[in-house]
Image (cartoon, rainbow, N blue to C red):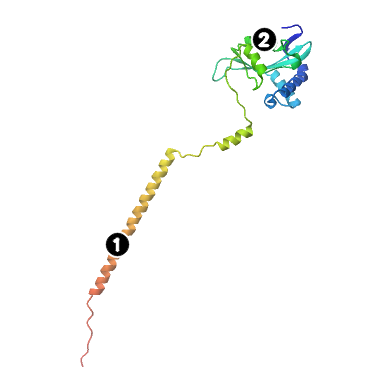
Amino acid sequence: MRPGVHVRHASSSDLEELVDLCLQARAESGVGRQLCSDDRERLRDQLSALGSVRDGVVLVATCDGEAAGLALCRLMGPGLLSDASVLSLDAVYVRPQSRRRGLGHAMLQAAAELADATGASDVCAAPLPGSRGMQRFLARLGFAPAAAHRVVSTSALHRRLALDAPAPTRRAGARGLEDLIERRRRARAHAAGDDDGVARQAGASMSMQVSRAVHNRRPSSSSTTTS
């Protein structure tokens, strides 16, 4: 560590300077919205919350007594899918006028010591797209690609989900039940049709028999009187 460069855990007295550093990093980044909010009050609350939780760490790097860099860290795990603990570097930033003086190296040294102290097996970082300087810095210290992060706004995700929704499909079991009901309905309709045909045939036969009886009936004898 070079003379005049120091790294320590941030305190409440560093809060305003840390907010200034976050806003400076946001303005410098091409994807500032993904980095942090531009609301000072919200940033102040978020930094306070991170520094107060057990697994959160806020490191501040000073150069000649002034806050010139920060590192935001979280201890993650063990979890459901892994029994290993990991120290996550959510953000590492050094103001432009204080670069090339060893502040980034000093903060990573403090992060490595923190990982040792907490039993973290790995240190991971997710630099923002386009931050070539940070990419080269991490690669020089041995950080290798491990995963790709993607981001989408909530409103855009809702729109894409609506457009990409699969067509509704019927379950095989439900379709089979519908087919069975339809076959039974047709069988009942067919049976009802047969019954109607038999009734019509019976009615026609009875009418024919009645007609024959009327036709073949002998005329009645006439009554005569003799004088």
Between 27 and 55, the one nearer to me in the picture: 27
Element under disc 2: helix
Between 222 and 167, the one nearer to me in the picture: 167
- Image location (x, y in percent) of residue 217: 23, 75
Query: Which is more foreground, mark 1 or mark 2?
Result: 2
Return the mark for residue 85.
none
- Image location (x, y in percent) of residue 179: 40, 44
- Image location (x, y in percent) of residue 24: 74, 21
Return the mark for residue 109.
2
What's the CA distance linking mark 1 and mark 2?
A: 103 Å
Residue 104 visible here: yes
Label 2: few (<14), some (14–19) or many (≥20) C-alpha neighbours in 10 Å? some
User: Disc 2 marks which amino acid?
Assistant: Gln
User: Disc 1 marks which amino acid?
Assistant: Gln
**In the displayed structure, would residue 42 be above or below residue 181?**
above
Residue name at image x 62 percent, y 34 percent: 156
Which residue ends up furthest to the bottom in the rendered image?
A: 227
Element under disc 1: helix
Instruction: Count the labels in the image.
Output: 2
The mark that comes first in sequence, 1 or 2, is 2
Residue name at image x 75 percent, y 9 percent: 5
Return the mark for residue 201.
1
